[in-house]
Image (cartoon, helix red, strand yellow):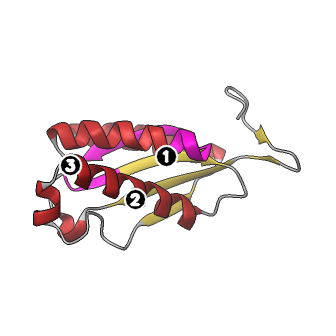
Amino acid sequence: MMAHSRYSRNVGAVYSLQYHIVFCPKYRRKVLVGEVEDALKSLLLQKSQELGLEIKAMEVMPDHVHLFVAADPTDAPQRIVAQLKGFTAHELRERFPYLKSRLPTLWSRSYFVASVGEVSAETITRYIEAQKGR
């Protein structure tokens, strides 16, 4: 991806696709704290790099995750969410076995995704960064 350009390029396209994604632990349990929060942030960065995503903003709340990502047009938002949730669920449940006993699955099946245009990108970033102060 082009770091400071408004648009990215691949072999056949010039694009700007950005998504605001929110997902929650099963039963909205407040388990995303302390070491779990730290590990989750690291795992999300690792997996996004693997997938070729750019995380523009990220905030982990005790009972939900906000991500603002830029993606390639070949990646469907549903696939992005599935990859991030699947990878982090597996890794976190391995590292923190108590998550297995507290939750039948780490993440709820649902999620929120909205496409974000250039005009509102800054607004979404500020909103996500302001979440910790709430």
What whole-number distance in Å separates the C-alpha atoms at marks 3 and 2?
A: 13 Å
Q: Which quadrant holds the N terminus?
A: top right
Camera-near label (3 vs 1) is 3
Pointer 3 or 2: first along the chain = 3
Pointer 1 or 2: first along the chain = 1
SS class, disc 3: loop
Q: Position of residue 107 (x, y in %)?
A: 30, 65
Q: Which residue is mark 1?
A: 68
- Of the pair 16 and 86, the residue shown nearer to us: 86
Q: Which residue is mark 2?
A: 85
Q: Amino acid at mark 1?
A: Phe
Camera-near label (3 vs 2) is 2
- Of the pair 69 and 53, the residue shown nearer to us: 53
Q: Position of residue 123 (x, y in %)?
A: 49, 42
SS class, disc 1: strand
Q: How many marks?
A: 3
Looking at the picture, does residue 108 appear above or below residue 84?
below
Looking at the picture, does residue 82 appear above or below residue 69?
below
What whole-number distance in Å separates the C-alpha atoms at marks 1 and 2?
A: 15 Å
SS class, disc 2: helix
Q: Which residue is mark 3?
A: 32
Q: Which residues are magenta?
A: 48-65
Residue 33 appears anywhere in the view: yes
Q: Amino acid at mark 3?
A: Leu
- Compared across the picture, whether 48 is left or right of 25 comes to right
